[in-house]
Image (spheres, rainbow, N blue to C red):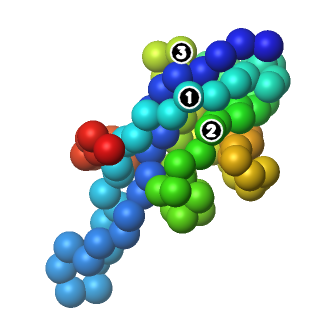
C-alpha cells in the first residue's frame, strides 16, 4: 500500500497535586507502512455523522516504542490525530489499529530523540 511518516503521541501520567493525575503527551516521529486504509461514516443521534477509520499502520519500532507501546494514544495522519485502538507487537514492528478522531489531551512535549 502506502508509506507512513508521522507523529505518535505517548501519554505519561504525572501527579499534578495531591490525588490529581494528569497525562503529559510526548510526540515522537516514526516511519512505517499503511496496511489497511478504510473510512466509515457512522450515522448517530448527533447532528453530524461520526467519521471513523479502520486503518492499520505498521511502524518500525525503536526501543522507546517497545517499552512504552501501552501508552500510545494517537497517530497524527493526514492532518488529523486518530485514536489508537490496539497495538500488536510483531518484532521489529508494531501494528497499530486506529479508529475515531482523538479528542484527548492536546498538551504535547516534542521529543527530539
Mark 3 and mark 2 lie on one chain; the one further toward the N terminus is 2
CA separation in Å, label 2 and label 1: 6 Å
Alpha carbon separation for disc pair 3 and 2? 19 Å
Where is residue 20? Give x, y as percent: 28, 77
Location of residue 84 (image quadrant): top right
Check disc 3 and report the residue beneath it: 78
In this view, the residue in front, 87 or 33, is 33
In-image side of 32 versus 5 (left or right): right
Determine the residue positioned at 27% across, 40% down.
112
Q: Who's the residue at 64% across and 36% down the image?
A: 59
Can you tell which quarter of the image residue 41 is in? top right
Q: Is residue 86 visible?
A: no
* Label number found at residue 31: 1
Q: Earlier in the sequence, mark 2 or mark 1?
A: 1
Q: Which mark is residue 60?
A: 2
In this rendering, the answer to whether 10 lies above or below 31 is: below
- C-beta proximity under 8 Å, tags 2 and 1: yes
Residue 8 horizontal/vertical position (percent): 48, 39
Q: Which mark is residue 82?
A: none
Name which residue lies at 29% across and 72% down.
14
Amino acid at each position: 500500500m502506502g508509506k507512513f511518516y508521522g507523529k505518535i503521541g505517548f501519554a505519561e501520567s504525572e501527579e499534578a497535586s495531591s490525588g490529581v493525575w494528569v497525562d503529559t503527551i510526548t510526540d515522537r516521529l516514526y516511519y512505517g507502512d499503511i496496511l489497511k486504509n478504510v473510512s466509515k461514516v457512522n450515522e448517530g443521534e448527533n447532528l453530524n455523522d461520526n467519521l471513523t477509520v479502520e486503518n492499520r499502520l505498521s511502524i518500525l519500532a525503536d526501543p522507546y516504542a517497545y517499552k512504552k507501546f501501552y501508552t500510545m494514544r494517537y497517530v497524527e495522519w493526514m492532518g488529523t490525530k486518530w485514536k489508537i485502538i490496539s497495538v500488536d507487537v510483531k518484532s521489529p514492528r508494531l501494528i497499530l489499529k486506529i479508529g475515531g478522531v482523538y479528542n484527548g489531551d492536546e498538551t504535547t512535549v516534542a521529543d527530539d530523540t
